[in-house]
Amino acid sequence: DSGVTQTPKHLITATGQRVTLRCSPRSGDLSVYWYQQSLDQGLQFLIQYYNGEERAKGNILERFSAQQFPDLHSELNLSSLELGDSALYFCASSTPADTQYFGPGTRLTVL
Amino acid sequence: AQTVTQSQPEMSVQEAETVTLSCTYDTSESDYYLFWYKQPPSRQMILVIRQEAYKQQNATENRFSVNFQKAAKSFSLKISDSQLGDAAMYFCAYRTGSNYQLIWGAGTKLIIKP
């Protein structure tokens, strides 16, 4: 158990819908990272937050957004969902400059 | 651009034997970190081992060790005394010292034959 929690574990929804994925980092970690793992594109970095502020942005679509709250949990919002958004979404956390530890992931299926 | 290449889509090894997974990377940075993560069928992403580029000594964690060749930009993972529980996808990942996003290889599927 990495200490990073993600909910829900599975999510099935329809095209055009909006979903929210939630992540709670390890105790003491200020940084949260979101990654997408899809069959055709592998693992890709989406976005990083540090202590409530956006720190880095990767290949995140405009339909996707994230935030980190004062209690350091983070949410990834995916809207206008398309079939191609079906993937495993990972959250990771770390102390600054340290190793990232991953949550169990949320499997999103868009029908 | 920084890239990570894992040229072996799949490897198999007999239980109790040793196997080496390859990873090469491309970077112009001098300060960076390299990682091996394991993803078993449960899909959990588990850290196996970490190497700082400034350290000449190869990292070791129990049965897992790396061969870090900085000049060749090579970072291979050696698994000794392979066990059935080692069966998983193994991903090589890279990040710079200042940019913490991980850049990933495509992964190598490791099969353990009993």
Image: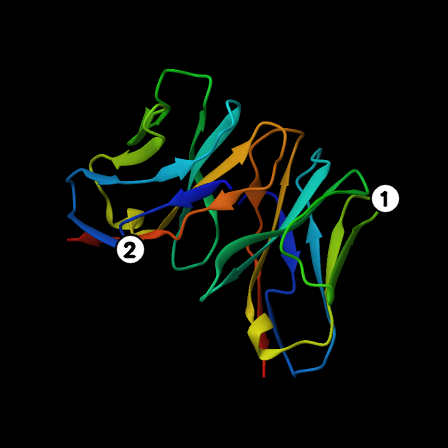
Say few, some or many: other residues with alpha carbon within 10 Å of mark 1 (under 14 / 14 to 19 / 20 or more): few
B76 left or right, relative to A43: left
Give the residue drawn at x 48%, y 49%. Answer: B45
Residue A8 visible somewhere in the drawing: yes
Colour setup of the view: rainbow
Kindly indicate whether the residue at mark 2 contacts the one at mark 1 (C-beta within 8 angstroms): no
Is disc 2 surrounded by few (<14), some (14 to 19) or many (20+) residues within 10 Å?
Answer: few
Nearer to me, B30 or A31:
B30
Q: Residue at x 25, y 50 (%)?
A: B84
Q: Nearer the viewer, residue A27 or B108?
A: B108
Quadrant of the rendered image containing residue A94: top right
Which residue is labeled 1 in the image? A70
Query: Residue farthest to the right?
Result: A70
Judging depth in this view, the residue of B9 and B83 nearest the camera is: B9
Residue type, numbered disc 2: Pro
Asked whether, in this view, residue B5 is left or right of residue A55, the answer is left
Residue type beneath disc 1? Pro
Label 1: state its secondary structure. Answer: loop
From the top left corner, tell me how far across and down residue A57 is, in percent: 69, 48
Q: The C terminus of chain A lies in which quarter of the figure?
A: bottom right
Name which residue lies at 30% across and 47% down. B86
Which residue is depicted at the point 59% across and 65% down? A9
Q: Chain of mark 1?
A: A
Q: Residue A38: where, in percent of width, then height?
A: 50, 64
Q: Write down the residue under mark 2.
A: B9
Q: Is residue A91 left or right of residue A54?
A: left
Can you tell which quarter of the image residue B99 is in?
top right
Q: Judge depth for marks 1 and 2 and give the one in front.
A: 2
Q: How many numbered badges does the structure rendering display?
A: 2
Residue B111 in sight here: no
- Image coordinates of residue B81 in percent, x first then y, are 20, 36
